[in-house]
Amino acid sequence: MLKRGMFISLEGVEGCGKSTQAKSLAEYVAKLGYSVVLTHEPGGTPIAEQIREMLLEPRHTDMTNITELLLYLASRAQHVGQLIRPALAEGKVVICERFSDATFAYQGYARGLDLNPLEQVNRMATGGLEPDLTLLLDMEVEDGLSRKRGGGYTLDRLESESVDFHNKVREGYLTIARRWPQRVKVIDAEGSIEDVHLRIRECVDQRLRSKSIVNSR
């Protein structure tokens, strides 16, 4: 395990392959000998999963932007307190699909909520916790949405937003990456699943080598 846990988040627009890549990364890190927790937001704990259902329900078209924000933060507070911090304290590698950057990209840059108070309430929800490494899977919005819409399942409330909304999300993510280049690494999400996985592995290997490590083998 790590002497101190490592927290890795995966971010990106809809359809960029976060779930697939998070699972592949978890399997890879586990093979290296580390204890891994794979989780996601919104959700990750029983209470947070119930909040997730409310947030993503397609029928909730009248949800206000502030309600949406506070529900995401309530889910995150429970997720951090019940799962993420305890796992990190045990020296585990936590791999999470979406974390705080998603809130800034979706509710901040795309919804237009003021970033300053958003930062304050998010800090309250996380207790100041930030990922050690964030992998931003970047691709054209239209390509990602095409993947989603070609999957044959009902789109959730966020996935059903306009292309313009999702372009704002992407630009928000890229702005975050420019602001925090040491933490946020932009990964080209175009190409085969294996190609993207290898790009991710390169970033993760570098970050693991930079930490004080004791693996479980």
Image: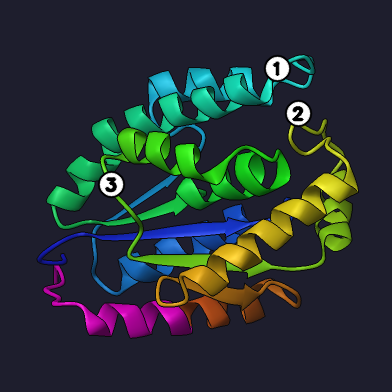
Q: Position of residue 81 (x, y in %)?
A: 25, 33
> Can residue 108 be seen in this snapshot?
yes
Q: Quadrant of the C terminus?
A: bottom left
What stretch of residues is rendered in magenta? 202-217
- Asked which secondary structure carries label 1, the reply is loop
Along the line of sight, the residue nearer the viewer: 27 or 131: 131
- Residue at image position (55%, 25%) is 52
- The disc, 1 or 2, on the residue closer to the chain's N-terminal end is 1
Q: Amino acid at mark 2?
A: Arg
The correct choice, above or below, for 52 with respect to 10 in the image is above
Q: Amino acid at mark 1?
A: Met
- Residue tagged by mark 1? 63
The correct choice, above or below, for 113 with respect to 95 in the image is above
| Crowding near the residue tagged with mark 3, few <14, some 14–19, many ≥20 C-alpha atoms within 10 Å | few
- Asked which secondary structure carries label 2, the reply is loop
- Asked which secondary structure carries label 3, the reply is loop
Q: Are marks 1 and 2 in contact (CB under 8 Å)?
A: yes
The correct choice, above or below, for 35 with respect to 209 in the image is above
- Residue at image position (42%, 63%) is 27
Along the line of sight, the residue nearer the viewer: 122 or 16: 122
- Residue at image position (77%, 39%) is 159
Find out whether residue 73 is within the magenta segment: no
Residue 157: mark? 2
Residue 128: mark? 3
Give the alpha-carbon distance from disc 1 to disc 2, as whole Å: 10 Å
> Can residue 79 be seen in this snapshot?
no
Q: Is residue 121 left or right of residue 24?
A: left
Q: Are marks 1 and 3 in contact (CB under 8 Å)?
A: no
